[in-house]
Image (spheres, helix red, strand yellow):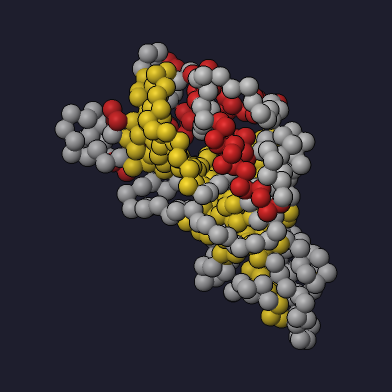
Amino acid sequence: MSAQTGLPPYPNGWFVIGFSDEVRPGRLLARQFMGQEVVVFRTRSGKVCAADAYCPHLGAHFGYGGRVEGEWLRCPFHGFCFDTQGSCVKTGYGTKPPPTARLKLWPLREQNGLLLVYHDGEGAQPTWEVAALETEGWTRPICRAFTLRDHPQETTENSVDIGHFAFVHKYRDVRELCEIQTDGPYLSTAYAVRRAAPLVGRVWRGLSFAFEFETQIYGLGYSLVRLSVPALRLRARLWVLPTPRDEERLTLWLAMSARIPWTGHAGNPLARLPGKALAWLLARLVLMGLAHDAQQDFPIWEHKRYVQPPALAKGDGPIGRYRAWARQFYRQEGQQET
Ligand code: FES
Ligand SMILES: [Fe+2]
C-alpha cells in the first residue's frame, strides 16, 4: 500500500519508462520502474527491449558497465550475453549457457516517441493497447520531467476534477463539452476553458484564449490531451505520463507536440510565419504554460491524503465515476476496494 493514499502502489497498465530519443542503437539506460530496477536497451538493428536490471547469473546490474553488443546485451561481471528474447546465448568462458539463465523482459511498445512498458501485478501479458497516433505534420514531442510524491490515480484524477480548474488554475468559463465516457481501460472527457495566454498573459493582462481540452485516458499511466485554441487554429497534443518509481514517488512526464495547419488561412495573424519553426515555438510556449499549471497542483498533490468516499458537492467533476473505473487496474492484485 502507498502510505499516502492507501491504494496499491503499482496499478496494472501501460506506463512510460522513457523516450525513443534517449535510447539510440547500441545504448542502454537504467530506470526505477514500479519499485524494480529495469534497463532499457536498443540493439544495433534498432530493436528496443526493457529487461530486469539484474543478471540472472550472479546478479550484476546491467546499468553499471553492461553493454549492447550487436543484438545482445552483455553483462559486465562475467560477460554472459542475452538476446532480445531473454535467452542466454553466450557465457564469458566459451562454455554452454545454462538454460536457467533467463533474463526477464517486460512487454514494451514504442510509439509516438514514447517507450511504454506494461506492468501487471501477476506478470500477465497485456490485454489492451494504447492507440498509436498519426505523426505526419506534427512536431516531435518535447518534454519535461518532474519527480513527485504521489500516486498515478491521484494525478490522473486531475482531468475529471472540474472544480479545481477555476480555483487552482484560474481558468474561466469552464464548460463540459461532453459527458465522461468509459470503455474498458479507456476514459474520455472534454472541456472548454478560458485561460490567460502563456507567458505574455502575465505581462499583457487580459490577453486570454479559449482552450478546448479533449482528454483520452488509457489506464492510469497515459493521458493524451488534445488541445486546441480555435482563435489561433492551434492544435497540440499534451501527454501526461505518471510512472511510479517506488511506493511513494513517481516521475511525471509532460510531453507536447503541435500541429499548425494555418498556412493559407487568410485573416489569421500568424499565417505568414514559417509553419514548422512556429509550431515548435508554440509547442514550447504551450508546454511552458501547461507545465506552469501542473506545478500549481504539485504542492497539493504531494501533501493531500486520499479521501474515499469523498464529500462531493455540485460543481465537482465526475470523480465517483472515475474512481469506479480506476478500480479495474488493481483487480489482479486483489485490491479493488479503493
Ligand atoms: S553476473 Fe552477469 S555474467 Fe555473471
Ligand atoms: Fe490541475
Q: Quadrant of the C terminus?
A: top right
Say how many tags the image has.
Answer: 0
- Note whether 105 is above or below 208 in the view shown: below
Indicate whether 49 appears above or below 100.
above
Residue visible at 68% across and 44% down? 336
> Which residue shows up at 55% across the image and 36% down it?
322
Give the residue drawn at x 45%, y 20%: 171
Relative horizontal placement of residue 260, taking residue 303 as reference (left or right): left
**Could you tell me if residue 265 is visible in this image?**
yes
Q: Residue furthest bottom?
A: 95
Side of 133 where 260 appears, left or right: left
The answer to which of 6 and 14 lies nearer the viewer is 6
Question: Residue at (53%, 23%) from the top-left corner?
Answer: 316
Using residue 246 as the reference point, say whether residue 18 is left or right of it.
Answer: left
Measured as percent of width and height from the top left, residue 332 is found at: 68, 54
Instruction: Give the position of the N terminus as an image quadrant.
Output: top right
Residue 195 visible to the viewer: no
Q: Position of residue 112 (x, y in %)?
A: 45, 53
Hey, which residue is sitting farthest left in the picture? 266
Of all residues, the one furthest to the top in this rendering is 205
Depth check: give the residue in front, 125 or 16.
125
Give the camera-side residue of 233 and 193. 193
Q: Position of residue 31 (x, y in %)?
A: 67, 52
- Residue 118 sits in which quadrant? bottom right
* Residue 254 spot, x, y in % from top left: 53, 39
